[in-house]
Amino acid sequence: MREKVLNKIIERASSIWKTEPSAMSEETVFADMNPKSAHYSQMTTFLEDEFDIEVPYMNFKRCRTFGEAADYIVELLED
């Protein structure tokens, strides 16, 4: 499940930041992407729709890397 979540994060991030998915991994740091609030909002909305869960924006924004974000989403799915 984690792999699927990570792939979805990378898929959306590549669209938001106009970057090749192959250039991103679980080690990709959000801060390196120069994210704006709207980017996090787009990401959380996408993940909510994709996995039919509620993703608290502020908690998601605390994730440092794509891998941490994937772990956080998996935790939400398990609850």
Image (cartoon, rainbow, N blue to C red):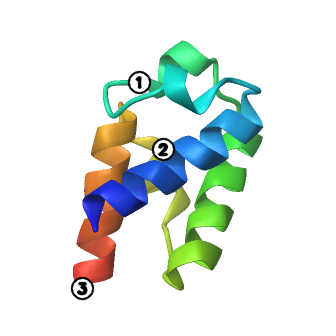
Against 72, is 78 above or below? below
In the displayed structure image, the side of residue 15 where residue 9 appears, left or right: left
61 with respect to 18 (left or right)? left
Question: Mark 3 to mark 1: distance in Å?
Answer: 26 Å
Identify the disc placed on residue 48.
Answer: none
Vertical placement of 45 versus 50: above or below?
A: above
**What is the three-letter code of the residue carrying label 1?**
Thr
Q: CA distance from mark 1 to mark 2?
A: 14 Å
From the top left corner, tell me how far across and down residue 13 is, in percent.
Answer: 62, 39
x then y, percent, for residue 42 = 72, 53
Crowding at label 1, few (<14), some or many (≥20) Cα neighbours within 10 Å? some
Quarter of the picture containing the C terminus is bottom left
Q: Are marks 3 and 2 in contact (CB under 8 Å)?
A: no
Q: CA distance from mark 3 to mark 2?
A: 19 Å
Q: Quadrant of the N terminus?
A: bottom left
Mark 2 residue type? Lys
Mark 2, residue position: 61
Which is closer to the viewer, label 1 or label 2? 1
Q: Residue 63's x, y, as percent?
A: 36, 41
Q: Nearer the viewer, mark 3 or mark 2?
A: 3
Query: What secondary structure is found at the residue carrying circle 2?
Result: helix
Residue that numbered label 1 is attached to: 28
Q: Amino acid at mark 3?
A: Asp
Query: Residue at point 66% right, 35% down?
Result: 14
Residue placed under numbered mark 3 in the picture: 79
- x, y percent for residue 52: 54, 85
Q: Pointer 1 and pointer 2: residues touching (CB < 8 Å)?
A: no
Reply above or below: 37 against 72.
above
